[in-house]
Amino acid sequence: MHDIVQDYYGKQLQSSADLQTTACCDISAVPEWLKPLLSNIHPGVLSRYYGCGLVCPSQLSGCRVLDLGCGSGRDVYALAQLAGPTGEVVGVDMTEEQLAVAKSHQQWHAEAFGFDNVRFVRGYIEKLKDLPLEPGSFDVIVSNCVVNLSPDKASVLEGVKHLLKPGGEFYFSDVYADRRVPDDVRRDPVIYGECLGGALYWNDFQRLAVAAGFTDPRLVTDRPLEVTAPELAARTGNIQFYSATYRLFHLDGLETACEDYGQAVIYQGTVPHHPHFFELDKHHKIETGKVFPVCGNTWRMLRETRFAGHFTFIGDFSHHYGLFAGCGSVMPFETGQADMDEGACC
């Protein structure tokens, strides 16, 4: 699979126009505040961009950031502007041709930005522990439509956990399926190269994330994908694919369900580019100045991460009130009197 991916992205694709699905390059998802940053990136880098979503999380000033599968470096150079001169962005990729494009424009970007805070490392994202990267040294790790291309996704997540600081975050976009992709579809080199063949069934991803120590994966955005090439659509059949962005926090001791401790937060409106509200994930849009009740996990995702200075925190963990209403969990037991005539048993 590594050979297939390196050939497809290094030799077969010459620009994003060569792609045969809508898995990548959704320009409509780019917010207005990010577009000026992208306009500062060299056209030679932009033309070789194959991402599937937005991986520029907020509050990156001074942060150390790692981009997995950085390709020609579009996201690295966007993140570099957000991290600023006191931050650092490292890009990792296994494809020589892509890295050559990224490195060839490094000096151009340093002059355009007024600082040089990026570097590139060749290597495999399944072997992050073998690369010259210090354990527990990154505030944020991102990846844009790359994890699906890996034949060993569990090792990728384990390596990410190894490199993140406590309270650090893996913020990444990728492709998922509504069912497990059959072997004959998964082995097709074009479908695999188009980021569909290696797509995980969404529930299998949840299990892998939890096994790697990311107990409470948070879905940020998602959209259905269209297989636009008729011959590829015929091969993928009824499988529905989605591009989705998740955030996984390196916080030990998160609970497997959303538990209610009577906690709340108040967003101060101070995260850059987000004066009116802050969106932690798809279900937590926190309005500025308003008391916002949260579960224990959400409280910790804000209190013990780089976002702590932007919130006022109410409550602690001294009292437990059961499951947090509306967080996707329900008590499995009947709330009324059981019908004894049914002969229920243990």
Image (spheres, rainbow, N blue to C red):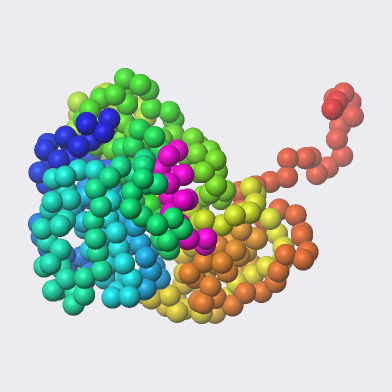
Question: Magenta part of the protein: which range?
Answer: 154-170
Position of 311 relative to 334 (above/below): below
| Whole-percent x, y for residue 298 in the image | 58, 61
Query: Front-most of 238 and 193?
Result: 193
Q: Is residue 297 left or right of residue 181?
A: right
Quadrant where the N terminus is found in the figure:
top left
| Count of numbered tags | 0
The residue sitting at 56% across, 50% down in the picture is: 216
**Residue 226 picture quarter:** top left
Estimate the x, y position of residue 333 in percent, counting from the top left: 77, 40
Residue 230 location, quadrant = top left
Q: Is residue 52 left or right of residue 292?
A: left
- Tell me the residue at 55%/47% (across/down): 213
Report whether 64 appears left or right of 35. right
Question: Is residue 27 something one can see in this rendering?
Answer: no
Please check the rendered image and state whether residue 127 is part of the magenta-colored stretch, yes or no.
no
The image quadrant where one finds the C terminus is top right
Whether residue 114 can be seen here: yes
Q: Nearer the viewer, residue 174 or 88?
A: 88
Q: Is residue 326 left or right of residue 195?
A: right
Q: Position of residue 54 (x, y in %)?
A: 32, 57
- Residue 18: x %, y % from top left: 13, 41
| Residue 331 in the image: above or below residue 110 | above
Residue at the right extreme of this rendering = 340
Q: Residue 178's quadrant in the figure?
A: top left
Residue plotted at (24% across, 64% down): 118
Residue placed at 70% from the left, 59% from the top?
Answer: 260
Front position in the image: 77 or 311: 77
Q: Is residue 180 above or below residue 30?
A: above
The reply to whether the magenta stretch includes residue 169 is: yes
